[in-house]
Amino acid sequence: MADDKSESDAGAGVDTPRRLTSALAGALPLTELSPEERLLVNAEISAAISERIRSVNFGEILDAEGVTTVALDDEGHMVRYAPGGTSGRLDDE
């Protein structure tokens, strides 16, 4: 559909924004992209992952699934967080 191409893409013969959108949606394999397009797609994926990580509380999710987790406290000590809310420093055990 040549009519769908923007003025800037028409000269190059490639509809890059549409290709990137298709790749991000999983409709176009990354192997079909140029190295430059892959770089842009990977940057978008990285940004989306970073944003999602900031909004997810993995401790709550893992606690709800019954998983014990370990993390460092503010002083650098390892702390075990058991399902149900109990916790304790590992060097105290």
Image (cartoon, grey):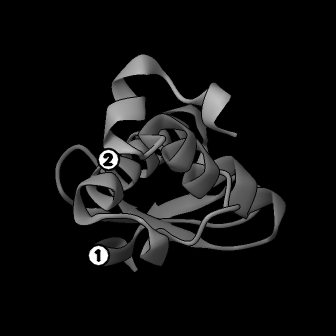
For the N terminus, the quadrant is top right
- Residue corresponding to mark 1: 91
Left of 53 or right of it: where is 8? Answer: left
* Identity, as a three-letter code, of the amino acid under mark 1: Asp
72 over 17 or under it: above or below = below
Left of 92 or right of it: where is 80? Answer: right
82 over 24 or under it: above or below = below
Q: Given contact means CB atoms under 8 Å apart, are the residues at marks 1 and 2 in contact?
A: no
Give the image quarter of residue 68: bottom right
Most foreground residue, 74 or 21: 21
The residue at the point 65 percent across, 27 percent down is 3
Most foreground residue, 45 or 26: 26
In percent of width and height, residue 5 lies at 55, 29
Q: Nearer the viewer, mark 1 or mark 2?
A: 2
Query: Quick one: SS at disc 1?
Result: helix
The residue at the point 65 percent across, 58 percent down is 86
Query: Quick one: SS at disc 2?
Result: helix
* Identity, as a three-letter code, of the amino acid under mark 2: Leu
Give the image quarter of residue 78: bottom left
Q: Earlier in the sequence, mark 1 or mark 2?
A: 2
- Residue corresponding to mark 2: 40
In percent of width and height, residue 12 lies at 32, 41
Left of 87 or right of it: where is 65? Answer: right
